[in-house]
Image (spheres, coloured by chain):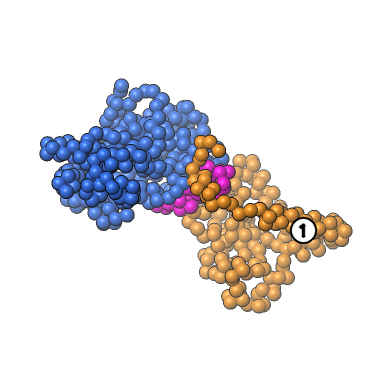
Amino acid sequence: MTSMGEGSSNQGDVHEGLNFAAIHKLPFVFVVENNGYAISVPLARQVAGSSVADRAAGYGIPGVTVDGADVLACYAAARDAVARARAGDGPTLIEAKVMRLTAHSSDDQQTKYRSEEELAAEKALDPLPLFRTQLRDAGVLTEEHEARITADIKAAVDQATDYAEAQPDPDPATALRYVYAEDVD
Amino acid sequence: MPARTFIDAIRETLAGEMRRDGSIIVLGEDVGKKGGVFLATDGLWAEFGDERVIDTPLTESMIVGTSIGAAVNGLRPVCEIQFADFIFPAFNQIVSEAARMRYRSNNGYGVPMVIRAPYGGGVHGALYHSQSVEAFFTHVPGLKVVVPSTPYDARGLLRASIRDDDPVLFFEHKKMYRSVRGDVPDTDYIVPLGKAAITHPGSHITVIAYGLMAHYALEAADRVADDGISVEVVDLRTLRPLDRETVLESVRKTGKCLVVYEDNKFGGYGAEIAAIVAEEAFDYLDGPVTRVAGPDVPAVPYNHVLEDWFMVNPEKIADAIRTLAAY
């Protein structure tokens, strides 16, 4: 399973790879998260025909478009694609239409190329609160359960970042190692 | 010992290694039923089948990218780029991925892979079937670059390259495929990477060359012997890692150094040799480190007069030897 954005899906290597994977019916699921922007360049300026999934037809493989804000729909699409791959039927291309809630990076000022209206509309589609509501409505998630999960995740992340930040920087004397295999470690 | 052409040595070594090690696969354009445009892989598909000898589309980036993935996952791919001139679509995969994998993963992953490619001019191959590309890759730490000049070395170096745990670019001069013959023992010998050979001992001047130029250097050495000039020819065999000791030892002995390469002169691989000799053997030099190399045009021309003008040949090398010897 490989994932990339719709921006990188325009690279020539993607064509070479999908073509080869389809020729040999490789067990491969290609996931494209289409958030509509490659940093600042909108979909209309990067993807001819506006659909990445439609390109799958050129390789004779299924191209599936799914609502990336719908967690269960994503699960179903992935489950079907994995089953197809395991059965020896070859690759599937899944295009998940998602929103981009934050700028591309901390240096990117996305209001320079996106309207306030567009940003506000996308925020209403944030999949995390939507999925929480869905699970609550189905009676799967209780307030107590959610609080426990949130605390567990926060603790795990804090522990990992504390550990990483406590590590010493590497000694430059080691920087020449592993350019090539070493016979004796 | 049986005499073999250069390409026989390559083909038999590929077959022998594939029999020895079931993890070796061969992939590239036309390497299957056809056996390669030069027949370097002839017979492999018949013996090892579709699973291990794979015809690919015309997709150099994918050929190398797939090989990297296969290597990381435990196979030993030997991929063929049909002509070295076609390697540039794969440049990103080779430089950004294959060369860096071990370093960036802190030795977690390696890429045991060989990329074979025929290079070089003098065969009327014109602008897209004649180039020397080694300097682009010798510049990159993490890659190894091998250029054999004899059937004996081709076999021993190809074995060493396939058994090596890092990515190796293995450049074969296409003019030598059928014109160069030599004895090749049937034993399982290796020519280690990073060891040059002194193919003609001498005392007045050191000539450093590789590939087809290693043959031309020997011819030039014979020509100037009549003038009383004793030439020591060093055949580098591996360009990276470089056998600095053999190069410097020879130059310290003779005091003069001529570097010969077929590629364009400016920024070519021989420039690095010249710099190393100047830095590390300056006190022993009795003349300027000199280069004989291709002219600085962007490709080997097609027209036969212009191709001859481009190519380094034994006479050009002999002239440069005489000039340097008289310095």
B43 and A123: which is toward the camera = A123
In the current view of this chain or complex, which residue is farthest to the top? B1
Chain A display color = orange
B184 and A42: which is toward the camera = B184
Q: Is residue B95 visible?
A: yes
In the current view of this chain or complex, which residue is farthest to the front? B283
Q: Please report the residue visible at 56 percent of the width from the left and 54 percent of the height from the top.
A: A56
Residues in magenta, as a range: B85-111
Q: Please report the residue visible at 30 percent of the width from the left and 23 percent of the height from the top.
A: B2
Q: Is residue B230 left or right of residue B84?
A: left
Q: Position of residue A5 (x, y in %)?
A: 59, 60
Q: Is residue B88 magenta?
A: yes
Q: 10 Å neighbourhood of mark 1: few (<14), some, or many (≥20)?
A: few
Look at mark 1 in the image and give the residue it sits on: A154
Chain B display color = blue
Q: Is residue A79 left or right of residue B268?
A: right
Q: Position of residue B118 (x, y in %)?
A: 34, 42
Q: Is residue B43 left or right of residue A105?
A: left
In the current view of this chain or complex, which residue is farthest to the left? B227
Q: Quadrant of residue B251?
A: top left
**Screen quadrant of the N terminus of chain B:** top left
Q: Position of residue B176 (x, y in %)?
A: 28, 37
Kind of element beneath mark 1 = helix
Chain label for disc 1: A
Above or below, comparing residue A54 to residue B159 in the picture: below
Q: Is residue A20 visible?
A: no
Q: Is residue A160 magenta?
A: no
Q: Please report the residue visible at 66 percent of the width from the left and 46 percent of the height from the top.
A: A82
Residue type beneath disc 1: Lys
Q: Please report the residue visible at 40 percent of the width from the left and 51 percent of the height from the top.
A: B139
